[in-house]
Image: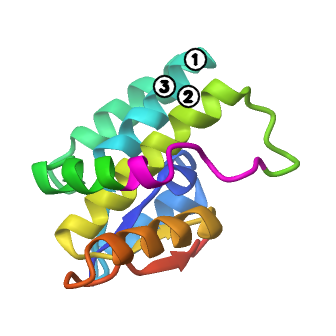
Amino acid sequence: MPVAWDTTLVSKLRPGSRALALLATRLRSTDEVAIPTASITEAVFGYARARRDVDLVWFSRFVASPEIRVISFSRAAAIAAGHVRARAPFPARPRSRDRRVKSERRVAWVADLQIAASAWAVGIPVETENVADFTLLSDLLAELFPKALPLEVRPSPL
C-alpha cells in the first residue's frame, strides 16, 4: 500500500542516506512512497535557505524522476485544508527544541495541513516524525468529513 512521506522524512533524502535506501527498497515493492508537493516545497526551501546547492540540485533532479510518485495539492485537498485551517489556524505549542520563529512555525503548519489533506484526498496514510500534529490534523479531518475514510498517521519508519 502506498504511503505519503511528510517533510520530516523527505528532508532526509540524500545520496547514501538511510531514507534513500528505504525509499529505493519500497520502490521495488508494493509499499510505494508518494511525496506530497508541499513536502517538496519545504525541502527545496530548506536546501535553498541553507545554500546547500549540491543537495538542492540532486533533490530537484531526484523528485523529477518518473519513478517518484508526487501527490499534487488537488482541489479536494485544498478545500479540506481550508476547512481544517479555519478550525486550527495556528500550530500546536512549539516543542522545546523548535528554534523557528512564530511566523516560520505558521508557514510550516500550513504546509502540514496541505500534506495531510493531500494524503487524505487520495486515501493513503502519512508517515511522519511529527505524529502528534498529524494526529490532530487527522482528527480534524474526521470531524469535518465524517463520511470519508480517516487519514491514517504512522510513525517514521526511519
Quadrant location of the N terminus?
Answer: bottom left
**Relative to 109, is 31 above or below?**
below
Cβ atoms at labels 2 and 1 below 8 Å apart: yes
Front-most of residues 74 and 16? 74
Measured as percent of width and height from the top left, residue 153 is found at 48, 77
Residue, disc 3: 45
Check if residue 137 falls in the magenta segment: no
Residue, disc 2: 46
Q: Which residues are magenta?
A: 84-94
Residue, disc 1: 49
Q: Answer yes or no: is residue 71 visible.
A: no
Q: Amino acid at mark 2?
A: Gly
Measured as percent of width and height from the top left, residue 115 is found at 37, 53
Circle 1 SS class: helix
Marks 2 and 1 sit apart, C-alpha to C-alpha, by 5 Å
Marks 1 and 3 sit apart, C-alpha to C-alpha, by 6 Å
Is residue 102 found left or right of 42 in the rendered image? right
